[in-house]
Amino acid sequence: MDRRGAIFGVGGGLALMAAGLPTQAAAGEVSSKVKDVVDRYERAWNASDMDAMSALYADDVHWVNIVGMHWQGKRDVDHAHRVYFDLMFKGVPMKLQEIESVVPLPAGGAVAVVRWSVGAFTTPVGQPVPPSRDRMSLVLIPDGDRLLIAHGANIQVDEMAQRSNPVPADQGR
Amino acid sequence: MDRRGAIFGVGGGLALMAAGLPTQAAAGEVSSKVKDVVDRYERAWNASDMDAMSALYADDVHWVNIVGMHWQGKRDVDHAHRVYFDLMFKGVPMKLQEIESVVPLPAGGAVAVVRWSVGAFTTPVGQPVPPSRDRMSLVLIPDGDRLLIAHGANIQVDEMAQRSNPVPADQGR
């Protein structure tokens, strides 16, 4: 909990209900489903288990990676991740630092921002990347009892820039 | 149109209906609402009109910018944009290149990926940034007849990296 209060923060339950969004009880359920996806993602990444990772995707998942490539549809998102795990990510640890936010979407989905620490790796053209942090936006849609990833956008944190965050409470986060 | 066919591509209308998502007719409507938001965003940016930009946000909008800052809630997202327009973006042109994808979300929302060209600017610490391209993921939720921005994640395109995109059709895009 930070200064924003509960994870569903701004506006609280009444605003959520007025917007046709879940009540706080239902929001808590969404939050635990998000955690489940994030935990599975972390395990799949660290096991380099692309079958397990792919099982988290919706059929029409889209993904924008840290260098701004945009992959469209499960086949391409899965293929690209397999290639990059073979080339550079196998054995590179990724650890959950924090699920920074979970904002419920209408009809039971959510959009979450997740902060990861990522071990050092070397790009396909031989450029070393030191240990870093990523902020990953995940758009999650309901599929029966669970959530699937409909969209991911992953941004590498520029540590220098964080010091000049214009939102004082976020400086250095 | 690219090799993926229609913008709502993979699976087509039947799969969308089975998932409780809009039919293609309704999807076309979503698509034009997305275009409306994107056009308004472009005009607001180029006019440095932060009131107009802020009017596009949902109350609980979250935003992750190109250096990985995560702003939570309309007050902070708006404040941060005002500060950065005063410091570096006022007069910097941003032009829509393409709405690369619109994937409908349950209950009438959508997630879109928009590619922009951005003029040169100078960071607050004096570092010049040459003209660049951004890929912006926008999560949009219905609000009456229009869509509001519930989430934005903006990634600067690494032009060198695009050449080695593991999805052949996407190389160099």
Image (cartoon, coloured by chain):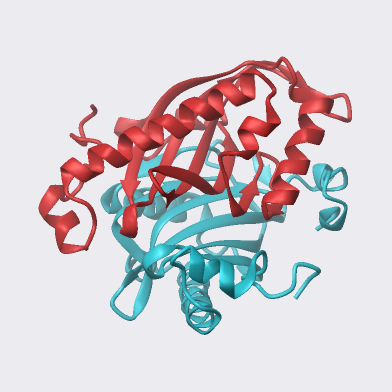
Chain colours: A cyan, B red
Find residue A157 and report its horizontal and vertical position in percent: 70, 49
Q: Height in image: B147 above or below B94?
A: below
Q: Residue at x 85, y 58 (%)?
A: A169
Along the horizontal axis of the image, is A149 left or right of B157? left
Choose between A112 and A120: the one closer to the eye: A112
Q: Height in image: B29 above or below A101?
A: above
Along the horizontal axis of the image, is A114 left or right of B16? right
Count the marks: 0
Q: Is residue B172 visible?
A: no
Which quadrant of the view contains residue A71?
Answer: top left
Q: Height in image: A156 above or below B161?
A: below
Q: Residue at x 26, y 51 (%)?
A: A75
Find residue B156 and report its horizontal and vertical position in percent: 60, 33
Choose between B152 and B130: the one closer to the eye: B152
Quadrant (top left, top right, bottom left, bottom right) of the N terminus of chain B: top left
Q: Height in image: B148 above or below B172?
A: below
Along the horizontal axis of the image, is B83 left or right of A15? right
Along the horizontal axis of the image, is B75 left or right of B52? right
Choose between B50 and A55: the one closer to the eye: B50
Find residue B134 and report its horizontal and vertical position in percent: 56, 30
Find residue A40 and report its horizontal and vertical position in percent: 46, 75
Quadrant (top left, top right, bottom left, bottom right) of the C terminus of chain B: top left
Choose between A41 and B23: the one closer to the eye: B23
Which quadrant of the view contains residue B6?
Answer: top left
Q: Residue at x 49, y 59 (%)?
A: A138
Q: Residue furthest left?
A: B14
Q: Is residue B54 visible?
A: yes
